[in-house]
Amino acid sequence: MGNGKKLGFWSIVLLGINAIIGSGIFGLPGQAYQMIGPSSVLVLVFCMVLAVSIALCFAEASSWFDENGGPYLYAKEAFGEFIGFEVGFMKWAIGMIAWAAMANFFAITISTIWPQAAEPFTKNVIIGAILIGLGIVNIMGVQASKVLNDIITVGKLVPLIFFIVVGIFFIKGSNFTPFVIVPTGQTTTTAFVAAAISLFYAFTGFESLAVAAKDMQNPRENVPKALVTVMAIVSIVYIFVLAISIGILGPDLSGSTTPVADAAKAILGNAGVYIITAGTVISVGGINIAASFLTPRSGVALAEQGLIPKCIAKNNKKGTPYIAIIITVVGTLLIAWSGSFTFLLQISVISRFIQYIPTCIAVLVFRKKYADKQVKFRIPGGTFIPVFAVVVSLWLLVKAGMSEPMKIVWGLGGLLIAIPFYFYMTKVYRPKESK
């Protein structure tokens, strides 16, 4: 594949923004306010600091490699093949589950303007159309995906930027007092933890960028720079949207399912609702596009290392891994149509940190293991940021487990399911293939 068909720096940035900003930001302010009131802005800043710390670890880790794989590759190189396979297997499986949920949410979002889309048959047709359609776009080549992703990402940012630019003039300072509002029966600490666990997931998705390194120009230099740029843009947008929503609606924001649309309506009437609803549809469509491009590459990374059949990494004439794309689309479609993805998403808490914590530790391993190798990006401050990211991630993980232990159980269950696949591939499949 020639360089002209690969993603340049700004296309990587737009893909990263698209992978993070989905439906969450349009519903996030109401949920955040309900949990801890106006001080949710500070909780969001805390989540931003943690997410940026983890993203910096991904940025440094990605600067050591040109290959596909992201968190799978880093875990494998730092801790060995088995740990790498566990991370990679979970990354691909959770990618399909998450994409199934996004496709379902796209149909639900469409139903706000076309009620028939909520009917089971019509909803399944929409889900099938978006999954198969995006699979075909991906098989057609990186260039087609790149153009579609760039247009959609700009399309989702425009309404949010418009909301920020206009809404900032309608903020009422009185809506920020009292600053901390704790739900009955909770302490400030438990309310903070619950809000942090919830809001942190609005930042997730950045970890997928390095998975598709081979489809990017100069990945060792561009991926780290793009990760830092993406997190800066997303953080600014999130904090402004939340603060402006609180400033306009105040207590009316609590529990709202369409908080940004409600705030836009308060200042612009129905026109505001239409602008934000259009932005939501584009945004949810956009995160589907990012998922369709990034999820198959998790399978490719495993296949390239011989941990699943190598034919899965095979490219067509357009240079795209068509077998991995087809398997991903079929798997995602079955999950989406089964309706069980909401149950499966319970393991998402574990799956995220199964990717994050090994990568943060891997950075420290690579600094010793590849001491003689030049890297394009190194986190400032020595070991502080990787250690901070690991400690805070473990703290959130423990707190999440204490409040919802079934998430821990199902997350560990996902890891156990991967074990027989690993032993089959290493003890049966690979020895047969090498004969």
Image (cartoon, grey):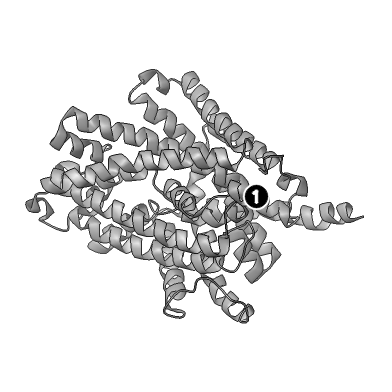
The percent coordinates of residue 177 (x first, y second) are 10, 55
| Res. 304 image quadrant | bottom right
| Res. 281 image quadrant | top left
The answer to whether 66 appears left or right of 274 in the picture is right
Front in this rendered view, residue 113 or 322: 322
For mark 1, what is the residue?
2
- Tally the numbered discs: 1
Residue at 35% x, 55% y: name it. 233
Q: Residue furthest left?
A: 174
The answer to whether 389 appears left or right of 339 in the picture is left
Quadrant of the image containing the C terminus: bottom right
Residue at 67% x, 40% y: name it. 318
Residue 256 visible, this orientation: no
The percent coordinates of residue 232 (x first, y second) are 35, 59
Residue 160 visible, this orientation: yes
Q: Residue furthest right?
A: 435
Q: Is residue 148 above or below residue 94?
A: above
Front in this rendered view, residue 345 or 172: 172
Residue at 48% x, 49% y: name it. 11
Q: Is residue 388 above or below residue 122?
A: below
Secondary-structure class at tag 1 = loop
Front in this rendered view, residue 314 or 291: 314
The percent coordinates of residue 186 (x first, y second) are 24, 57
The answer to whether 323 appears left or right of 48 in the picture is right
| Res. 262 image quadrant | top left
The percent coordinates of residue 197 (x first, y second) are 37, 56
Crowd class of label 1 (few under 14; some 14 to 19; many from 20; radius 10 Å): few
Residue at 64% x, 59% y: name it. 67
Amino acid of disc 1: Gly
